[in-house]
Image: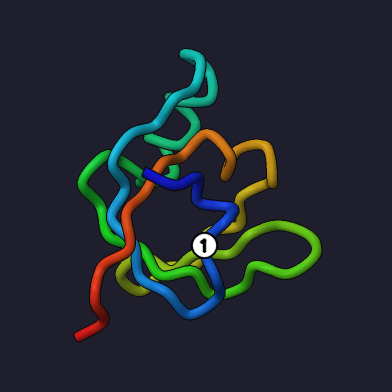
């Protein structure tokens, strides 16, 4: 398991676990991010980390992305 903020741009990942408090877990859930979801890292340079899920783009702060643990998957 790797924190989401360490994944390189362009890689697809599966969310394995979210290690966050109740408030942040609820916020991520409201954004549509749950364990088991597959997202693609669109931008991981300076500023917020941007991921794509289905047809949506989500901006995550660095602190948020550090609490989301993922595993890389092969792009189809």
**Label 1 packing within 10 angstroms: few (<14), some (14-19), many (20+):** some
Q: Nearer the viewer, residue 71 or 68?
A: 71
Q: Residue at x 50, y 45 (%)?
A: 3
Residue holding disc 1: 7
Which residue sits furthest bottom? 76
Return the x and y of residue 46 as percentages of the image width and height: 80, 65
Q: Residue at point 50% right, 67% down?
A: 57
Kind of element beneath mark 1: loop
Image quadrant where one finds the C terminus: bottom left
User: In the image, 72: left or right of 9?
Assistant: left
Residue 37 percent coordinates (x, y): 25, 52
Name above or below for residue 65 compared with residue 12: above
Q: In the image, is residue 72 above or below residue 55? A: above
Check the image and name the residue furthest to the right.
Answer: 46
Q: Residue at x 46, y 40 (%)?
A: 68
* Relative to 6, residue 1 above or below: above
Q: Residue pushed farthest front?
A: 1
Q: Is residue 65 above or below residue 48?
A: above
| The quarter of the displayed image where residue 14 is located | bottom left
Quarter occupied by the N terminus: top left
Residue 27 locus on image (x, y percent): 49, 31
On the image, the x and y values in percent for residue 22 come to 46, 13
Residue nearer the viewer, 75 or 60: 75
Coloring scheme of the render? rainbow
Q: Judge by depth and name the residue closer to the eye, 75 or 61.
A: 75
Left or right placement of residue 62 versus residue 14 in this view:
right
Q: Which residue is depicted at the point 26% across and 39% down? A: 35
């Amino acid at each position: 398991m790797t924190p989401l903020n360490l994944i390189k741009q362009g890689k697809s990942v599966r969310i394995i676990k979210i290690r966050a408090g109740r408030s942040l877990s609820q916020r991520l859930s409201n954004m549509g991010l749950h364990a088991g979801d597959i997202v693609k890292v669109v931008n991981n340079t300076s500023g917020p980390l941007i991921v794509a899920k289905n047809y949506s783009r989500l901006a995550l702060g660095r602190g948020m992305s550090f609490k989301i643990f993922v595993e890389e998957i092969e792009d189809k």
